[in-house]
């Protein structure tokens, strides 16, 4: 008993008080270790596109339809397979449509129920009964368990199962049961979901995506740069908040704030109407990427709000840069480089004419000082973000399930980049007087992001952490940004596009090198057999770029959900599947609408590319959870030995 402490075994004995119970649990765990590894599903850069996200989530990047082909490929036509798949994705809505043209609903229900039971049996076969039982909806768990474990060789049992189906139909519960079976199938085809950053910005419904993710059965999240902005705003960062509102105005997404989160923008609207009433705000006309219908007056007001919050943002950034010379961002104190008299802006020794020279709230002698009304606007917005219960719940979920990076089953997941120098060394940043690089920099960034949210207000540590959250959005050594500088001001005010260029970090060239990817894996404690799963940057497949880099060591899975990127990328992005047979990269064509998917059974057209095939099928024993289970088995065997050698006495009950 030297290998394991008797004190610990005494605690373990409370859960396993007898030899019989201990042995049973060992048998159970060792059996689980030999089951096939569950399927992991990787998504990234969803950017508020709820409908496309939901389709990919429900179809498991094509896994559901593949399972239907496995079971019914030689029995059903392609049209029938598409109908069944759509029914699994959207059971309630599709059922209503199918029943409209169905002459014999009872026969339809019977056929469909038997098909779904057979499909569910297939997708649940690699799980324990206990796990499947826990996934079942409570109202139907007993009946589902009976049907999923039927024995086709027993004629009496066949009659028993047929009677169960008939009773479900006659009691008018078929619709509910079909919905329950469909949702169970969706749940079982994917064991775990990884979201590699950026739910927020660009698209209209990040809140609905967050609600869906909060209900998902098994999930982790690697924070993206846009997520960090919203987290910063919810934590109390005025400059992060200003960025959030500015981006929402720029892409006509203010409804997210007002309707989805109930955050009043009236103080900003009134201020903007007052200060910029006669200003055409030409440089701040919002981008209408989805051709939504707005009146001229609405667009004009949004443009005024857009300009007002952008100017406030530039003012808020200056003092942060001054407080942190270690950021090396003096060139981003943009108001210092405006020649208000001549209407020019100086960039790297060159003067450029300003497209907009109307700055009524900026005092050239003290350009970063907020006016009294600007301060009032920011204070009211900060209070609204802080007191928005729904937003705070979403942000708390991001903190609970999220991180800057994750190592999982031998793979490394992160959103943006590993900041690197051109020579392949890790770029360092000074934080609280000490320099960090590589994994240590990620760890510090995560600690500070958590402090920014959880520390009480008015503490210096919190203020410092809030500044770092903004740096993560825009700083050169940020693992979420990955560029030398963010040229927001130039994009608004300078016509010459040379000034708009944001130089990418050396990482984005170096990640094509297998040796660099192996170096990164080792930095994070993984061996060379692992892979890096990276989001953030859309893959321009139309230009010949590949999502598979460095001989398969690096996989870039920017989901491409944002419609704005489709012309650039040539497709709607990538997702990734990792099952017991290996890794598969799935490329997707653009999604139309949920209504069309239900009505016309138009699934997202997806193409699979096998990246790596396992010579020997991966088992639970080969996973991170398997390592934990093996340790549990070892501990239980020590407990069993302690019982058998008399070091511990068996107990009659757990409470004794």
Image (spheres, grey):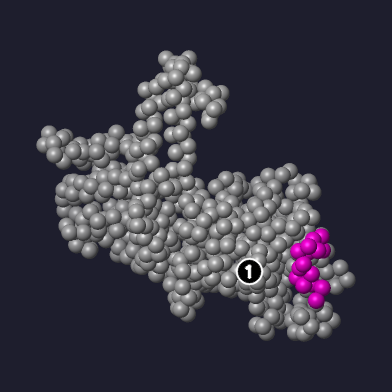
Does 569 sit above or below residue 32? below
SS of the residue at dot 1? loop
Relative depth, front residue between 54 and 228? 228
Does residue 152 appear left or right of residue 591 in this picture? Answer: left
Q: Residue 431, how many percent across, how many down?
A: 75, 56
Q: Pinpoint residue 379: horizontal percent, then vertical percent.
A: 74, 54
Q: Is residue 260 above or below residue 124?
A: below
Q: Give the residues in magenta.
A: 321-337
Crowding at dot 1, Cα within 10 Å, few <14 / some 14-19 / many 20+, comes out as some
Residue lying at the far left in this picture: please name it.
155
Residue at x 49% of width, y 69% of height: 550
| Residue 175 visible within the image | no
Residue 148's quadrant in the figure?
top left
Identity of the residue drawn at 49% across and 64% down: 553
Give percent across and percent down for residue 100.
24, 55
Q: Does the magenta stretch include residue 333?
A: yes
Residue 152 in the image: above or below residue 410: above
Residue occupied by mark 1: 424
Q: How many marks?
A: 1
Q: Which residue is drawn at 75% across and 70% down?
A: 332
């Amino acid at each position: 008993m030297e290998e394991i402490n008797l004190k610990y075994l005494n605690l373990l004995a409370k859960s396993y008080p007898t030899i019989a119970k201990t042995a049973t649990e060992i048998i159970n765990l060792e059996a689980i270790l030999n089951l096939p590894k569950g399927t992991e599903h990787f998504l990234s850069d969803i950017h508020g596109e709820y409908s496309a996200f939901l389709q990919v989530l429900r179809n498991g990047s094509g896994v559901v339809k593949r399972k239907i082909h496995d079971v019914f490929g030689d029995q059903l036509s392609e049209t029938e397979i598409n109908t069944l798949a759509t029914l699994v994705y959207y059971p309630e809505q599709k059922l209503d449509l199918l029943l409209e043209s169905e002459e014999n609903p009872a026969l339809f229900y019977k056929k469909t129920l038997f098909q779904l039971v057979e499909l569910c049996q297939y997708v649940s076969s690699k799980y324990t009964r206990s796990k499947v039982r826990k996934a079942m909806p409570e109202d139907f768990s007993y009946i589902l368990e009976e049907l999923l474990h039927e024995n086709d060789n027993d004629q009496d049992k066949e009659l028993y199962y047929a009677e169960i189906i008939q009773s479900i139909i006659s009691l008018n519960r078929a619709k509910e049961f079909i919905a329950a079976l469909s949702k169970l199938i969706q749940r079982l085809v994917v064991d775990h979901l990884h979201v590699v950053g950026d739910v927020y910005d660009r698209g209209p419904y990040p809140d609905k995506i967050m609600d869906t993710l909060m209900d998902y059965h098994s999930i982790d999240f690697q924070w993206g740069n846009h997520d960090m902005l919203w987290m910063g705003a919810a934590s109390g960062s005025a400059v992060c908040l200003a960025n959030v509102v500015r981006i929402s105005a720029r892409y006509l997404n203010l409804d997210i704030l007002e309707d989805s989160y109930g955050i009043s923008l009236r103080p900003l609207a009134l201020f903007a109407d007052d200060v910029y009433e006669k200003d055409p705000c030409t440089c701040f006309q919002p981008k209408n990427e989805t051709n939504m219908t707005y009146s001229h007056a609405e667009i004009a007001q949004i443009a005024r709000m857009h300009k007002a919050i952008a100017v406030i943002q530039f003012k808020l950034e200056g003092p942060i840069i001054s407080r942190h010379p270690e950021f090396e961002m003096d060139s981003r104190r943009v108001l210092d480089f405006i020649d208000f008299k001549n209407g020019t802006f100086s960039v790297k020794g060159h003067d450029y004419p300003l497209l907009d020279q109307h700055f009524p709230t900026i005092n050239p002698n003290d350009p970063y000082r907020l006016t009294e009304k600007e301060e009032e606007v920011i204070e009211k917005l900060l209070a609204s973000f802080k007191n928005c219960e729904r937003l705070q719940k979403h942000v708390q979920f991001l903190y609970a399930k999220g991180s800057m990076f994750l190592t999982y089953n031998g793979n490394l997941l992160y959103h943006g980049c590993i900041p690197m120098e051109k020579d392949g060394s890790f770029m360092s940043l000074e934080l609280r007087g000490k320099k960090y690089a590589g994994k240590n920099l990620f760890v510090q960034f995560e600690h500070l992001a958590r402090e920014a949210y959880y520390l009480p207000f008015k503490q210096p540590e919190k203020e410092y952490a809030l500044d770092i959250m903004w740096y993560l959005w825009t700083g050169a050594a940020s693992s979420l940004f990955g560029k030398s500088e963010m040229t927001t001001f130039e994009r608004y005010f300078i016509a010459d596009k040379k000034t708009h260029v944001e130089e990418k970090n050396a990482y984005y060239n170096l990640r094509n090198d297998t040796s660099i990817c192996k170096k990164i894996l080792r930095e994070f404690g993984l061996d060379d057999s692992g892979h890096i799963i990276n989001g953030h940057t859309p893959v321009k497949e139309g230009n010949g770029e590949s999502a598979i880099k460095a001989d398969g060591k690096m996989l870039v899975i920017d989901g491409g959900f944002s419609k704005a990127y489709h012309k650039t990328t040539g497709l709607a992005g990538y997702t990734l599947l990792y099952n017991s047979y290996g890794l598969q990269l799935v490329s997707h064509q653009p999604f139309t609408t949920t209504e069309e998917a239900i009505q016309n059974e138009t699934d997202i057209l997806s193409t699979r590319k096998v990246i790596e095939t396992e010579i020997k099928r991966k088992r639970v024993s080969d996973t991170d959870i398997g390592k934990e289970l093996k340790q549990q088995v070892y501990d239980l065997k020590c407990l069993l030995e302690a019982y058998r050698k008399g070091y511990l006495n068996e107990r009659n009950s757990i409470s004794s």
